[in-house]
Image: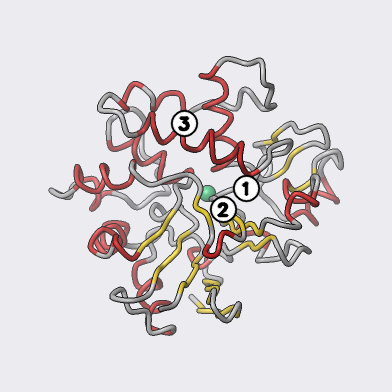
Amino acid sequence: MADYFIGDIQGCYAGLRKALAVVEFNPAKDVLWLTGDLIARGEDSLAVLKYLYKNSDSVKTVLGNHDLHFLAVANGLKKANPKDNLTNLLDSSKLPKYLDWLRQQPLIQALPDKSGYMTHAGLPPLWKPKTAKLWAKNVSDELNTSNYLSFLPLLYGNKPSVWTEEMPDQDKLRYTISALTRMRFCSPLGELDFSQKGSPSLLDQSMSKSFIPWFQLAPKRFDKNKWIFGHWASLMGETGNKNIIALDTGFVWGNHFTLLDWQTQSFIRVDA
Ligand SMILES: [Mn+2]
C-alpha cells in the first residue's frame, strides 16, 4: 500500500492519468490524496470527477475555492467564470451525484501517521490545528445539510479578514472558508489579503512588505505538524520549510504536477 499526494488537478484529466501511471497507482491498494481545486480550468473536469467518484474509496481530498465555486455555479447561484471549462460537467446527467459527493468532502484531512494536515490554502494566522479542525467541521456540517443552498451565499466576500473569538458564527464560517481555501498572504497581525496571488519575491518588489506568506507567520506552529497544501502555483513548491509542502506546481498552466510518495518521502515531477 502506498499514499500519493498530488497538487491541484484543475480538470486536467489526461495529466492526472499520466501522473497515476508514472507511480503505477493501484486504487485497490493505494490511496490518492488531493489538495483540492479538482476541477475548473483544464480540458475535462467531467472525466476527473467521474474517475474520482468511481475510485472514491481510495481518494482523500479537501475542497478548494474552485470546487466550492462550482457548487454555487451548478446551483444557479453564481455565473461560471468564462475561463473555466465546466460545460460538459454542468450538462452531465450525473451532475447531482457529483455535487453530493463534492459537498461531502472536508476542508482539512489529517495526514497518514497523524504527522500533520492537508488543506487547500493553509493554516490561518493565530490558529492552532485544532481550531482549523473544529471550524472546518462546522463548515462541512453546513454543506451536508439538506438545505445547504442557503449556506452557499456565505462563501462569498472578503470580510471578515481577521479572526476574533467575539465575532458571530456566520462570520467565523466565512473566515474559515476564506482562510482554508483562498488565503495566500497575511499581515503579521493576522489579517488575510485576497488581492495578491504572485510569488513572495514579486511581492517584495512591488507590493507592501507588511504582508507575508501565511506559512511564515508563527512558523513554530509547524515544527510538530507538517502541512501539505495546493492553491498557490506561483510558489512552484518553494516554502523554505521542509515541514510545509506546497504541491501545486501549475500543471494546468503548462508547468508540472508534483507528486509526493508518502512512504519514501520522495517527490516525483510529471511535466504537462
Ligand atoms: Mn485554489
Residues at circles 1 and 3 in contact by the CB criterion of under 8 Å: no
Residue type marked 2: His
In this figure, which residue is indicated by the disc labeled 1?
122
| 152 vs 32: above or below | above
164 or 93: nearer the eye?
A: 164
Q: Looking at this rendering, what residue extends furthest in the left direction?
A: 93
Q: Residue lying furthest front in this view?
A: 113
Amino acid marked by disc 3: Asn
Within-10-Å neighbours for mark 2: few <14, some 14–19, many 20+: many
Label 1, secondary structure: give it.
loop
Q: Which residue is mark 3?
A: 138
Q: Is mark 1 within 8 Å of ligand 1?
A: no
Choose mark 1 or mark 3, whichever is in front. 3
Q: Residues within 10 Å of mark 3 (few under 14, many from 20)?
A: some
Q: Are marks 2 and 3 in contact (CB under 8 Å)?
A: no
Q: Which residue is mark 2?
A: 231
Secondary-structure class at tag 3 = helix
Occupied quadrant, residue 79: top left
- Residue 211 drawn above or below residue 76: below
